[in-house]
Amino acid sequence: MTASPRVLVLCNGAPRPEDQGEYKNVLTLAYQLNVPTERNIELALPNFVRGIYHLPDRLLDLLEIAAYVFSADRLIRRGERDDVEYHAWARSFEFRIRVRDHAFWSQDDVNHQLSEALTFITGDRDFTFLFQSGHRTPATSLFDQEEFRIEPRQRTSVMLFSGGLDSLAGAIELLETSHDHVCLVSHRSQPGIMRTQNGLVKALEQQPCYKGRISHYPFLCRLTGVRAPEESQRTRAFLYTSIAFALCKALSQDEFSVYENGITSLNFARREDLTNARASRTTHPRTLALLQSLFSEIANCPIRINAPFVWHTKEDVFRKIRSFGQELLIPSTVSCSRTFQNLGNATHCGTCFQCSDRRLAGYASDCDDIDGLGIYAENFITANLDGEARTTLVDYVRQARDFAMWNVDHFYKEMLNGLVEVVDHLPGMSNELEAVETLWKVCRRHGEGIERALRIIRERHDHPYSDVPSNSLLQLVARREYLKEPVQRLIEAIVPRLSKAVPQMFAKGRLPKDETDLNQKIHALLDDWRDDDDLVSEHPTVSFAGARVIPDHALTKTDLLIETKYIRGGTTPSKASEGIGDDLIKYPQRKHTLFIVYDPQTAILDPHKFQHDFESRGKCTVCVIR
């Protein structure tokens, strides 16, 4: 796999290098008005510092670093969601930043911890940092001096507050079960998010039992003058937790909390291609462990990041809010990942992963009557879902079904790769066996809750005398799309990508020279999509009845073989048919074979019949590409 060109990011007036040839893009980022470059980030760092009186230079540096990383993340686009070349999703960044505490940030160990945390959180290829000295900012208040500290007058709890359902539940639980003063830390980047956070904080402050116990610390960080081309925002977790850590140090605290339910935090892959950059790890246990280690290094003392909801499901979060009598605040929270779209008066699109997860949990917890009060632009129960939304929902329900049906041993076997990154970072676990069993129980409860939600939805919305809307949740459940084998789901991901990419590759009459040439190009497409060690062409051989046969391509971690047929000149449709028939006989029945038939001159008169004749025999799929 060819490495992606590096992106160079110059911050706080760091100079450009003389040789820029190795960099795909060179970004210059600045938030101050008194630097030589144009200001292109809005960063409310001075206001945030005034609110807490003082931050040491090292923490000011951290907030700026986090803001610059977040901004660069949003300015450099990942690949399209239907890209065949999946490595486009993994980028390479080199940051050159002028800092105040150069002696600290230039240490190899600090640099390594920062890079390791960001690489895991984002799934990007790598992050490197070159720190330069000489950065200074003016005093932000009369109290901006090293010896000044705020000593809390009462016990204080610091927590992240996004305005989502889980963070609201966490704030309510803290206020209800303790006498602590609760500090809510927010990152603001869009007007809608600001309104949501302000509205929820105001609603909590107005309640007599919470009066005088809440402080809200918003931190503004956003691009100016440009619409962000990348919306995945994987680095937001680094920015958010850095803000909370800085506040903790100003308040002489050594811990803060991140409230996110365990199913969302763990985010076990729901299909083969949802790994690395395509899977969010923003509150993953290993993410929090890496950030906790980095912050402890910066503070020169132990810092703890708590995850109180790691053993909760989204259904549990709904029930918790209702148990405290605060369910009327539920519609005011925002969970949608597409709030930047024009949703009219709605606050949620209704079809993204976060919306689907929330709605199903709402039904499972009997909170759908409150959660569905006009906040969704589309009703995923009856809406015609687009390709991505449909695939996401099917994968989600399939995984929930598996969790509900697997025993603990099968759960361990199937989820081993994901568990390796989790078990060593879970709180309160004495050994691996206890961690795995506890995780299994949480996932099983989640699966059972989704099954309960689907039963309720069908009872209420599936009317026997009405047609089931096409590509809706009701149709997906009626057709049991989530019961298809993983290999079939994998094929359904490969086929549209190849069907799109192969004609583009050979556009304007540039046809492949022969079948070998076609195979080499298809291999390149698949190799960029899959992991390097998971795709081989004409290797390994497959044993069958004492013979050794070699497929054109094999995905070694699945039971999928891929054979390519190129119809041109002497290779007629009948000859391709004979080749497919021979392949079906020689390959083991446990394997599923995907036949890619490239027919650029439309020699196959009836491609649907051609496909059906072979697919009716089972264990194969035929894709005719023109």
Image (cartoon, rainbow, N blue to C red):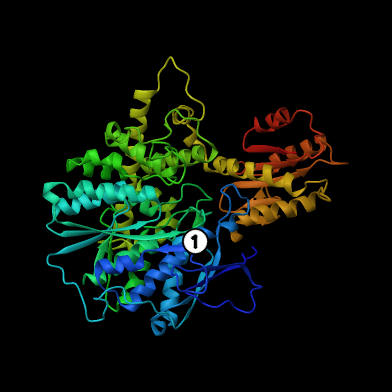
Where residue 257 appears, x then y in whole percent? Answer: 26, 60
Viewed as shown, does residue 370 lie left or right of 206? right
Q: Quadrant of the N terminus?
A: bottom right
- Find the residue positioned furthest to the bottom: 103
Q: Is residue 590 visible?
A: no
Foreground of the two, 400 or 46: 46
* Residue located 52% across and 43% down the image: 486
The picture quadrant where one finds residue 213 is bottom left
Instruction: Say which residue appears at 71% left-offset and 42% top-offset.
Output: 596
Position of 467 relative to 42 (above/below): above
In the displayed structure, would residue 179 be above or below residue 46? above
Answer left or right for 96 relative to 431. right
499 left or right of 444 in image: right
Res. 487 image quadrant: top right
For the residue labelled by badge 1, is the local secondary structure a helix, a strand or a loop?
A: helix
> What amino acid type is highlighted by mark number 1?
Asp
**Which residue is rendered at x = 28% and y = 50% of the image?**
198
User: Which residue is at a point 40% across and 48% down the rendered structure image?
Assistant: 410
Q: Give whichever of 575, 460 is nearer the camera.
A: 460
Which image quadrant is residue 344 in?
A: top left
How many numbered discs, if any? 1
Report x, y in % for residue 45: 35, 67
Which residue position is annotated with label 1? 73
